[in-house]
Image: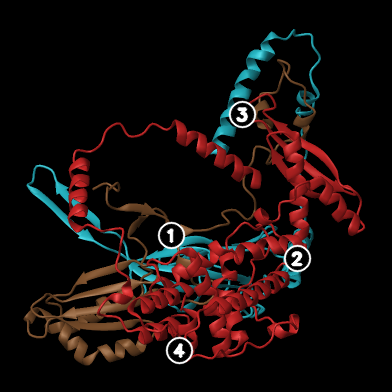
Amino acid sequence: MLAGLMRNVLQRRTAFLPTLTKCLPASQPTSRLSQSSHIALQQEVLPTDDEIRHVTSSTIQKVNDLVAQGNEGRLFAVIHVAGKQFKVTAEDLILIEGYWPPSNGDEINMEKVMLVGGVDFTLVGRPLLPPGLVRVKATVIEKSLSHTKPVFYKKPRKQYRRLNFYRAHLTMLRINEITITGDINNPPSVVQVERPPL
Amino acid sequence: MSNSHLFMSAGWVTAPLNNGIGRYSGQLQRVVIKFCKTHGCSRGVREFVESNLIDFSRQNPGVAVYVKPRRHRAPTITAEYCNGERGYMHVSNMSRDEVYKWLSHQTTQSGREFCRYRKFWRTETPSIQGVWSPHTFRDPRLNLAEFPMVSTAPKDWFRFC
Amino acid sequence: MQALRRSLLILRASSAASRLESRNFQKYVAPTYKAFLSKKKKMGRLADPHPRNTFAEWNYDAELYAFGQRLRENFEPEILKQALLDVSYLEKRKIEQEEVGIEPELNLEHNGEMANTGNRLMSLYVEQYLTTTIPKLPKKYIKNIRDHLISDDMHAHIGKQLGLSDLILCDEYPPTPEILVRAFRSVIQALAISSGADRACGLVRDLVVAQIAGQDLTLFCSPENPLKELEEHLKSTNQQPPEPRLISVIGQNFILSSYDVGVYSNKIMIGRGFGESAETAQNMACCDALWRAWDVTVRRKPISFKLELPPLEKFDVSVKTPSRPVVT
């Protein structure tokens, strides 16, 4: 809401600009802003493979160090459960719709983690993060039914109409903790094998 | 078919007493099973009381179970929750398994007033990497820019605003 | 974030006042309410509900056992009974007996003493838990959080949500908040007597300390003069004094102006705040710097609610092992 208001204010101000600029005499020297925005053509220099490798490994090392020191702060994760994705952080509540076997009081690990992020970094899975890298623990706290939802079909001009009702199963989950338990870019279950010479 | 009803309120996902953050505790405190000893519509309940009730009670030690036979009345189950709410259910003509199913269903509820959930997610920390503000990604050169700008401003002046 | 939340609140309040309500009522609304009213009149005496323990289906011992099992604790029945015996109940019984002409002779003891001891145990444990989990926060702010957690309102709320209203023996129904508070504190003490102080502390952690989950801790630690407090903080940690600097201003002449101020110490940004004026933004920036230093921002690692603290005796020698009351 605030963002929307701010955007309005911005738009209003930018709308003023052209009318104001028109009033100015043409002989006035250009401001610093307009001068500096004339960008000279530059040749694009691509980083070498070594540089890319160095940047990658040092970035991964930084994140690993943060996690090792326990300075990663609050983490959030995008988990995939029962066909839907939820962005969760510790102490969140989520509702899972549809039949889902776990019962009340069960503590479960969410295995399908698509993304995990903190204040300073984000790890994005392709599409999932390797198993064992992130632990998302949750507790089932309620299993109930949704409100009665009407389902109405009608075929026009065919004397066909049906009114059905159903209530979906709802399971409430409390997310207890999200922790990074493994080394980044070093999944324990994957063993690197050299390609045999052809 | 709309979502706005007079009698059904819309609400958000909540759990009583932050349940599940510490230990999980069930919210059903007692169940009263009322049935008739002779009528046919109480047959399933009678069978349930005879064969499954002890098991049910052992599985759910946190629920006080009362059995109340009464003459010539339809069988019902009343579930009372910790927050003072109660759920009331007619179980006439139900089979033993159905009674067992609905009774087990009552044990997993929180007893919250029935509502339509607006969202299936609740969080107290909606943003961890920071929310957007008008200052985010703003060009620092704008701090020193003088307004109004001259007419020869570049065509992409809006990028800086 | 703080500034954003506050401004959102103000905006919401202002928009709610000017919101146009729906133009007309549906046709069925009036008849429905009329039907409700006539049913209410027929039922009568709605304000005076019958206490649950006067029903035919009531077994107090079974209820107490189930209460312990719900919390996964083993209470000794006699001690739990005493914890749920309010002083008002005893007074009422006494008056009743006097009216009948019986010599009032009650060997029962109410839960007043237990409530005091239980509250002391709780306050010690909560404070210790908070100091362990938020070690950088100064004592006075820790006390603010602790006071919130052991306040009467909080304990009455917890007692009610635990279903104590039906179990308490007291004069009035539903029980007043004061009665619920006494009962909840005594229940903690009853557990300490039945299964030891460690179990009681575990229950306090799961029921009381867990209530700060999801709460904004900065609400409990907002200094009155943030700049001064920040100066003192930096001085005590041998850092350079703070220097507030304006980072940017947006909409200076508008109603929704926004100032962005950073606080620097030794040319390193230690806090950043927003506000509708430069002064507010500066205060918010200083608060932000302090909150970051105290580690109470939303970005901090979530507080763990599974910690096992050392036994109470180790951090407070004055707590003696609770003695068993004589119950007859």
Q: Residue at x 42, y 33 (%)?
A: C19
Judge depth for marks 1 and 3 and give the one in front: 1
Judge depth for marks 2 and 1 and give the one in front: 1
Q: CA distance from mark 2 to mark 4?
A: 63 Å
Say if mark 3 contacts mark 4, CB within 8 Å.
no
Q: Residue at x 45, y 61 (%)?
A: B14
Q: Are marks 1 and 4 on the same chain?
A: no
User: Which chain is red in the rendering?
Assistant: C
Q: Give the residue type that dot 3 points to.
A: Leu
For the question of whether residue C174 can be seen, the reply is: yes
Mark 3 = which residue?
A10
Mark 4 = which residue?
C77
Q: Are marks 2 and 4 on the same chain?
A: no
Instruction: Determine crowd level at label 2: few under 14, some 14-19, many 20+ residues with C-alpha closer than 10 A.
Output: few
| Left or right of residue C114: residue C86 | left
User: Which chain is cyan in the rendering?
Assistant: A
Judge depth for marks 2 and 4 and give the one in front: 4
- Image location of residue C202, percent across then percent down: 59, 80
User: Which chain is brown in the rendering?
Assistant: B
Say if mark 3 contacts mark 2, CB within 8 Å.
no
Judge depth for marks 3 and 4 and give the one in front: 4
Say if mark 2 contacts mark 4, CB within 8 Å.
no
Q: CA distance from mark 1 to mark 3?
A: 36 Å
Mark 1 = which residue?
B13
- The chain to which mark 3 is attached is A
For the question of whether residue A125 can be seen, the reply is: no
Q: Secondary structure at mark 4?
A: helix
